[in-house]
Image: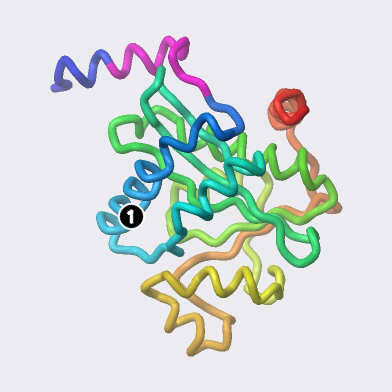
Amino acid sequence: MNTIEELVLEKKMEQQDQLTIRIANESHLRYVHTILDTIEAAAKVRGTGIAKRSPEYVELKMKEGKAIIALMGEEFAGFCYIESWGNKQFVANSGLIVVEKFRQHGLAKKIKQHAFSLARAMFPQAKVFGLTSGAAVMKINTELGYAPVTFAQLTDDEAFWRGCQGCINYDILTRTDRKYCICTAMLFDPEKQKDKKEIKTIIKELKQQLK
C-alpha cells in the first residue's frame, strides 16, 4: 500500500505543473553537490561503476548550457549533461540521474529526451553515443534511435576515455585494450537515423532557451 507521501508525490507528478525540465544555467549551481551525491549513491546501490566528475566539471557544464536539470518546484529531481568529443564529431550524454522518490514516473525518459535533443540542437552533425550498464537507459536509448555498437565505433578521443578512470570497472577496459567493458556502447548516427516528431519539438524548445 502506498504511503500518504507517495500518493501526494504521484499526484504532483501527474499534474506536472510543478515539474520543470530545462537547460541548466548558473542559477542552478546550488544543486551541484546534491547532483553528485545522488549519482554516487545510485552507483553504490546498483553495485556498478560510474565515471566520477568533480563539482567544477558539473558547474562548467551548467555554465556552458550543456546540462539538463529537472526540478519539482525548487527541489532537485534529475539531471544529465552532454559533452562533445573528437573535434565535435561525437557527442555523449552522461550523468543521467533521477532522485529515488521521483523514479517510476517516466522522468528519466523525459530527461534523456531533453539531453538527446540538446545534443542534436547544439551539434546537429555529430554522432550521439553513450556507455551504460543500465537496462532502463538502454531501453530509452533504443526508443530514441540508438543502436548497440562496438567500442571501436565510438570516439577515439583520449580525453573521453580518461573520464572512465574513476569507474571501478576501468581495469576491465584497459585489460581488453578498450574493446570490452561492463557497459554497452550505443550510437545514434544522424546520417542513418532520423529524429522523431517528439524530439523535433523538444529541439525547437531548447533552441529558444539557448538564444
Q: State the residue position of label 1.
A: 40
Task: Give me the residue at 42% from left, 83% from top.
Answer: 171
Nearer-the-camera pick, 202 or 81: 81
Q: Quadrant for the N terminus, please.
A: top left
Q: How many marks?
A: 1
Q: Secondary structure at mark 1?
A: helix
Q: Quick check: can you spot residue 147?
A: no
Nearer-the-camera pick, 162 or 30: 30
Task: Give me the residue at 63% from left, 73% from top.
Answer: 151
Nearer-the-camera pick, 167 or 176: 167
| Magenta-span inclusion, residue 89 | no
Residue 185: x %, y % from top left: 59, 64
Magenta range is 9-20
Q: Residues within 10 Å of mark 1 (few under 14, many from 20)?
A: some
Task: Give me the residue at 80% from left, 42% from top.
Answer: 194
Q: Quadrant for the C terminus, please.
A: top right
Residue 163: x %, y % from top left: 53, 68
Q: What's the coloring here?
A: rainbow
Compared across the picture, whether 137 is left or right of 93 comes to: left
| Quarter of the image where one finds residue 67 | top right
Compared across the picture, whether 107 is left or right of 9 comes to: right
Q: Is residue 74 above or below residue 196?
A: above
Q: What kind of residue is marked 1?
A: Glu
Q: Is residue 59 above or below residue 130?
A: above
Residue 201: x %, y % from top left: 73, 24
Q: Is residue 76 above or below residue 119?
A: above
